[in-house]
Amino acid sequence: MTTSLVLVGAGQRGVGYARRAVATGAGRIVAVAEPSPERRERFAAEFGTVAYADWRDIDSRVADAAIVATQDRDHEGPAVRLAGLGYHLLLEKPMAPVEDSATRIAEAVARSGVMLAVCHVLRYTPYTKVLKSLIDDGRIGEVVSIQHLEPVGWWHQAHSFVRGAWRDTASSSPMLLAKSCHDIDWLLYVAGSPARRVSSFGGLAHFKPSSKPAGAADRCLDCAVEADCPYSAPRIYRNAGPGWPLSVVTSSFADLDEALRTGPYGECVYNGQNDVVDHQVVTMELASGATVAFTMTAFTPFEQRKTRIFGTHGYLDGDGAAIRLVDFRTGSDTTLAVTDDVSADHGDGDDALVDAFLAAVASGDASLIRSDAATSLAGHRVVWAAERARHTGTVVSLS
């Protein structure tokens, strides 16, 4: 069975999901809603779909399911509306920037009886499957503590969270939600236990006016010190291959200089247009009694996450490409290779998520989706608790 789909939001993520659905033959796109005329026309030409400027123009059920991939603050409206019309939903993470909005989405899904898959793509990688099976099979005994690093990457931070759409909390969401709700969800998933208490520390250490070098201009193309700056926009984008991140800046490499001269991606990273954190630590006590220490930092290469899991009978150390397993009982020390595409930010998770969602809709089997609305909402509530803890200097308890 081929699942018919409506796409709301024809940006990078939405187009990627749509292409995967069509490429496998499991999905077909019947309509797109996208406010940008250029994106709307480009998508309609590629997929041959009906095109709407506004998701509100979709006033009936014209497909089996919908992909909602708008900006974070625009998720609630289409998700609630389309769930009410009977669409199963593939919803880009985060569900919404604030708890009330995310709760209304979960309630709309429950009322309508539709399936919801939030794009927690890290749950769907081969690496995660192997790692979680080792834990669930008792290969390291009981999990006692976890240490997890998200290395955002210096140029990725500059691209997405200093110059890009997620640089400002008020117009998007906190960094921990926009980037790291992946990780919080994943940690709870592999540990198999909800969080009980949360604390957090972090802030904006570097990307601010006080760090601006002497002689720096407001734009990289006008800057006398650009050649020595690690966050040089010309260097980042001229050295980028086709596709992301260059595709976010310009549709044509020939127009790159004009985009850098006039658009946000050519601005100095020290101009002060951003307020999201560039480093953050979250500590969690789980209901099981295990503890988790999570670090997100901009000041790394752009790499896969790195995780160490300490158990009563063994130890796991993983980096997305391989998992080291040390068994305290036998003394064995083995390395298990996995099949993720480690050149991608999410391994093979993006494609596997789309495949699982389409299979769930086609079969009516919601168990193929590895997190339901309530599970995703619970993970998001940990993020909001961590933000409260960071701002107040307290430990926040969760029910």
Image (cartoon, helix red, strand yellow):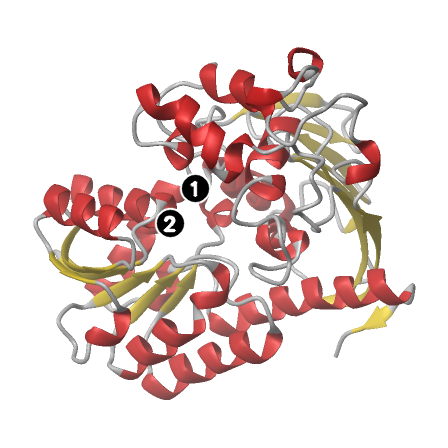
Residue at the right extreme?
393
State which quadrant residue 32 falls in. bottom left
| Label 2 with label 1: CB-CB less than 8 Å | yes
* Few, some or many residues within 10 Å of mark 1 (<14, 14–19, 20+): many
Q: Position of residue 72 (x, y in %)?
A: 49, 61
Q: Position of residue 372 (x, y in %)?
A: 46, 68
Q: From this viewpoint, is residue 194 visible?
A: no
What is the tally of numbered marks visible in this picture? 2
Q: Position of residue 215 (x, y in %)?
A: 76, 21
State which quadrant residue 74 falls in. bottom left
Residue pictured at 47% horizontal, 24% vertical: 343
**What is the three-letter code of the residue carrying label 2?**
Leu
For the N terminus, the image quarter is bottom left
* Few, some or many residues within 10 Å of mark 2 (<14, 14–19, 20+): many
Please give the residue where the numbered disc 2 appears in the rendered image: 353
Please give the residue where the numbered disc 1 appears in the rendered image: 349
Residue at the left extreme?
48
Q: Position of residue 307 (x, y in %)?
A: 70, 36
Residue pictured at 70% horizontal, 26% vertical: 300
In this picture, residue 346 sits left or right of residue 170: left
